[in-house]
Amino acid sequence: MIDQHKDIRDAVAKLCADFPPEYWRGLDRDRAYPEEFVGALTASGFLAALIPEEYGGAGLGLSAAAAILEEIHHQGANAGACHAQMYTMGTVLRHGSAAQKEAYLPGIAEGALRLQAFGVTEPAAGTDTTAIRTTARREGDHYIVNGQKIWTSRAEYSDLMVLLCRTTPVEDCAKKTDGLSVLLVDMRPVKDKSLTIRPIRTMMNHATTEVFFDDMEVPVENLVGEAGKGFRYVLSGMNAERILIAAECIGDAKWFLDKATAYARERKVFGRPIGQNQGIQFPIAKAYARMRAAELMLHRAIALYEAGENPGEEANMAKMLAAEASWEAGEACLQTHGGFGFAEEFDIERKYRETRLYQVAPISTNLILSYLSEHVLDMPRSY
Ligand SMILES: Cc1cc2nc3c(=O)[nH]c(=O)nc-3n(C[C@H](O)[C@H](O)[C@H](O)COP(=O)(O)OP(=O)(O)OC[C@H]3O[C@@H](n4cnc5c(N)ncnc54)[C@H](O)[C@@H]3O)c2cc1C
């Protein structure tokens, strides 16, 4: 289980100590990519935690990966620059051919190749993934890709992209979830030619982009699994993704709670610590209880996942509850700090902006509630 990974957590905390708050503050100010941090995480092997040993990874389970990401966030750092590799790699691992795994996974494990980009969302389709318009048309031994993605994070800092596109027009499919395929795109030869990447400046430092495909050629051997089954392949990675993001939120919540309680103890106003006032204590205590409850759900989701079950319910609930808990902890922390909460040098306003994302991406709260309503509580589908 996740709390058994003390050695991993200690080692991650030690690594993070080399990247103090000033490092993250500077990157945030410049909207720059944490190259050195990602490099150190790769060199340490943590980013390859989930890659099987036969391909050069650590061959660990999801609980270890969750512990790594949680600890990064608990230390005040941010794994958003590289966490996708842990779950996008799973698409190749589960559905890729032996030749694809052999060709890519060892390079990813040793850090020679980066698989950080996951191109699913499109501007017109939004959450309705089956409505995507990016197409891949087969011509001889290549697919010709045309279309556009948005919010493709880390595309500028990745060699490879897992790309979802339509290979059969929706009107020719029995179900709208059919006819979608996953391509593993090597972006290096096509970048700035048939592939254009444009950064989007956002309220936090996330290296997200929009990407445009203009007759981009992808060799047919880069099709992952079978053509037309891509939607299922992408869905199959969702539980792991939800669990890993929930772990990051728990880490954020713990960081906010550490900061809030330390300040509440030391800051004196009216001649006594502000933490002596229940008006300061209670929001922090409430956020702590919410974090612990979300953490339990996360542990439950991980236990089921590692037992080979399909914890769709628990993974979704863990992600939603953890994202809400980190936000509540952020609120309590900011309020506890009064005016200083807004000062850059306290890092709270940065973490506050960063953790807000997880109520929207990679899946928004409403869609989790829709999932629970329909698939768990057996109410009619709302969309
Ligand atoms: C910083 C950032 C990084 C991201 N990185 C990636 C990435 O790497 N790869 C990628 O593919 N995507 C990425 N995304 C996209 C992200 O997954 C989407 O933003 C998210 O899934 C929400 O989709 P949308 O923005 O299109 O919102 P929309 O689908 O336009 O929805 C807008 C709002 O309406 C609500 N809504 C929509 N339909 C319903 C309904 N039926 N019932 C109730 N409410 C509904 C949603 O919950 C949301 O609150 C990223 C987004 C951001 C902001």
Image (cartoon, grey):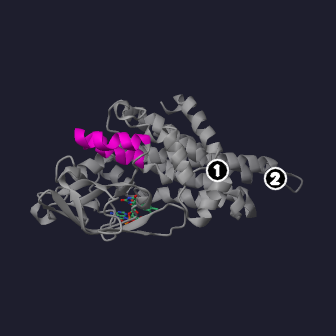
Q: Is residue 46 above or below residue 211?
A: above
Secondary structure under tag 1 reads: helix
Observer able to see residue 69? no
Query: Is residue 246 left or right of 256 when viewed as pictured?
Result: left
Q: Quadrant of the C terminus?
A: bottom left
**Circle 2 residue:** 267
User: Which residue sits at x=53%, y=31%?
Assistant: 3
Q: Is residue 220 above or below residue 44?
A: below
Magenta-span inclusion, residue 221: no
Observer able to see residue 366? yes
Any atom of ligand 1 within 8 Å of the CB at mark 2?
A: no
Q: How many marks?
A: 2
Magenta-span inclusion, residue 101: yes
Q: Is residue 21 above or below residue 132?
A: above
- Characterize the magenta stretch by its predominant secondary structure: helix
Query: Is residue 176 left or right of 311 when viewed as pictured?
Result: left
Q: Is residue 59 above or below residue 316?
A: above
Say which amino acid is labelled 1.
Answer: Phe
Q: Position of residue 216 (x, y in %)?
A: 25, 65
**Circle 1 residue:** 256
Dot 2 alpha-carbon crowd within 10 angstroms: few under 14, some 14 to 19, many 20 or more:
some
